[in-house]
Image (cartoon, helix red, strand yellow):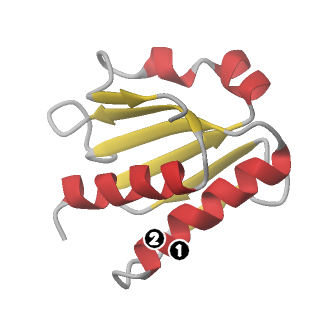
Amino acid sequence: MQSKVQADLVVAGAKDGKASQIALYDLREKSSLADYVMICEGRSQPHCRGIAEKIQEKLKLTKIRPLGIEGEMEGTWILLDYGDVIAHIFHPDIRTYYKLDELQPGPPLETWDEE
């Protein structure tokens, strides 16, 4: 599956989980780590876990499973590693503290807020 299609599925899962402040970064020409990084936030720890679950459900439909999951128990910063696409789901305070968006090389490819 093409990495952009996979990234779109990650974003769709985040939207299904009612994530806010969604940003998708294109790293294809800038990093060997991943092609895309999606960063979003949830209102609470259970909400962050719910967003992660929705993303996993969306990709599982296409038989794609994460290579790794970190932070699911804590629920303040959950990382889902799909190889070419990495998803970060943050509690707003943690996103503000770590400023991961500022570490990305350039502006987001696309952004979405609550719909």
Q: Could you give the CA–CA distance between mark 2 and mark 1, rounded to whole angstroms?
A: 4 Å
Q: Is residue 86 left or right of residue 32?
A: right
Q: Nearer the viewer, residue 94 or 19?
A: 19
Circles 2 and 1 in contact, beta carbons < 8 Å: yes
Label 2 sits on what residue type?
Lys
Return the x and y of residue 51 as percentages of the image width and height: 63, 55
Q: So how many labels did they put on this image?
A: 2
Residue 58 image label: 2
Q: Nearer the viewer, residue 2 or 113?
A: 113
Quarter of the figure with residue 5: bottom left
What residue lies at 62% left-to-right and 58% top-to-bottom? 52
What residue lies at 58% left-to-right and 64% top-to-bottom? 54
Q: Secondary structure at mark 1?
A: helix
Q: Is residue 83 visible from the viewing direction of this image?
A: yes
Q: Secondary structure at mark 2?
A: helix
The residue indicated by pointer 1 is 57
